[in-house]
């Protein structure tokens, strides 16, 4: 593995071995001193051209738990505002002795371009509505910890699938690990070509509630035009929001997930995120272990964790 850009071409063996490694790193994170020297002397750069709370901080924490140094780029305070190009920006950061870059960008494909320009591993931290591979890995780790395996599970991904890079990555990872994925949402928020994917689709959430093991909720991506295709957020919440009434109709062992940031009262009821059956914060915690596994795989060399 030279880069981690997409979930589309990762086979089951690679996915499972990354998740196994993440389980080991999760154990490291529970120690009194949650740190190992695996990446001592390496420098990791977070290049986030789009806003982020979880993904950026999680990568920073993961790098530090492996004893790597971190440098961080923010567009608002950078020379981008003086007209510097994307290519010159990343070449500049590379020239500072950076060993790996994590890139989030509003443009689909930006991490691939950067991977062509630079001679170091690139991790896609989310490109446009396209891919967000480490989110899919942390989601699969969280499901695997709860159910033992994804094999034979039914997972409903609900909401703004059309604009969701999380859904695009999750679909490939979850199905590669043996789960069945149902996309649920208003037809205007479902992809135009769902038959190109290994999924089934429906616009009726209530009809699938008692058949699923995981309800995976997506945020309506207002910044990508998500809210412009239905009458109001209130109406969306009535038809597709995971409220307490719907929660009660799930199977007893079914769980609710969300990648964050959540819009409580829209796709997820005010209290649902805090319910015992919500894995939202476990997803966040697992994000660190998964990103440690990916960083170690890409720049850990022959060293032993
Ligand atoms: C997501 C993203 O930015 O793609 N958040 C995340 O990384 N956990 C989902 C979103 O913005 O809705």
Image (tube, rainbow, N blue to C red):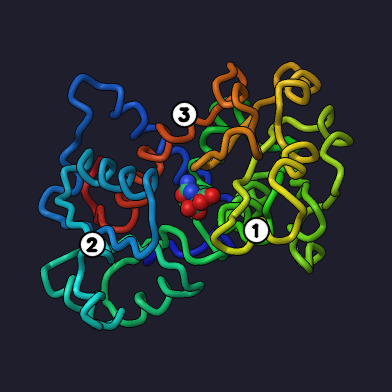
Element under disc 3? helix
The answer for how far apart the CA atoms under marks 2 and 3 are is: 26 Å
* Res 236 → quadrant: top right
For label 1, the SS is helix
- Asked if residue 125 is positioned above or below residue 254 in the image, the reply reads below
Where is residue 65? Give x, y as percent: 22, 38
Q: CA distance from mark 1 to mark 3?
A: 25 Å
Q: Is residue 1 visible?
A: no
Q: Earlier in the sequence, mark 1 or mark 3?
A: 1
Query: Which residue occupies 62% across, 24% down?
Result: 272
| Residue designated by label 3 | 281
**What residue is at 24 percent from the left and 56 percent from the top?**
301
Judge the density around disc 3: few (<14), some (14-19), many (≥20) Cα neighbours within 10 Å. Answer: some
Front position in the image: 183 or 141: 183
The alpha-carbon separation of the residues under discs 1 and 2 comes to: 28 Å
Q: Quadrant of the C terminus?
A: top left
Q: Mark 3 or mark 2, which is nearer the start of the sequence?
A: 2
Pointer 2 residue: 73
Q: Residue at x 74, y 16 (%)?
A: 252
Disc ID at residue 226: 1
Q: Is residue 133 left or right of residue 197?
A: left
Q: Residue at x 30, y 49 (%)?
A: 296
The picture places residue 204, in percent across and down from the top left corner, at 86, 43
């Amino acid at each position: 593995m030279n880069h981690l850009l997409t979930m589309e071409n990762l086979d089951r063996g690679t996915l499972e071995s990354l998740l196994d490694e993440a389980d080991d790193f999760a154990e490291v994170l529970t120690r009194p001193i949650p740190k190992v020297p695996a990446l001592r002397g390496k420098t990791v750069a977070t290049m986030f051209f789009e806003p982020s709370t979880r993904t950026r901080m999680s990568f920073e924490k993961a790098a530090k738990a492996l004893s790597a140094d971190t440098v961080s780029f923010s567009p608002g305070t950078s020379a981008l505002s003086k007209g510097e190009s994307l290519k010159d920006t990343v070449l500049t950061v590379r020239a500072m002795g950076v060993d790996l870059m994590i890139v989030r960008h509003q443009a689909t494909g930006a991490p691939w371009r950067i991977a062509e320009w630079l001679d170091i591993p690139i991790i896609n931290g989310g490109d446009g509505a396209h891919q967000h591979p480490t989110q899919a890995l942390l989601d699969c780790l969280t499901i695997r910890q709860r159910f033992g395996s994804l094999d034979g599970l039914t997972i409903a991904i609900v909401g703004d699938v059309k604009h969701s890079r999380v859904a695009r990555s999750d679909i490939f990872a979850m199905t590669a690990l043996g789960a069945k994925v149902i996309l649920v949402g208003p037809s205007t928020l479902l992809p135009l070509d769902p038959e190109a994917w290994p999924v089934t689709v429906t616009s009726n959430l209530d009809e699938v509630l008692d058949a699923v093991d995981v309800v995976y909720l997506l945020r309506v991506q207002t910044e990508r035009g998500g809210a412009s295709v239905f009458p109001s957020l209130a109406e969306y919440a009535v038809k597709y929001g995971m409220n307490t009434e719907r929660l009660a109709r799930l199977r007893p062992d079914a769980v609710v997930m969300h990648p964050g940031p959540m819009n409580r009262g829209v796709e997820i009821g005010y209290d649902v995120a805090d319910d015992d059956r919500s894995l939202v914060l476990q997803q966040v915690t697992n994000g660190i272990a998964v990103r440690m596994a990916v960083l170690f795989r890409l720049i850990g060399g022959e060293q032993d964790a």
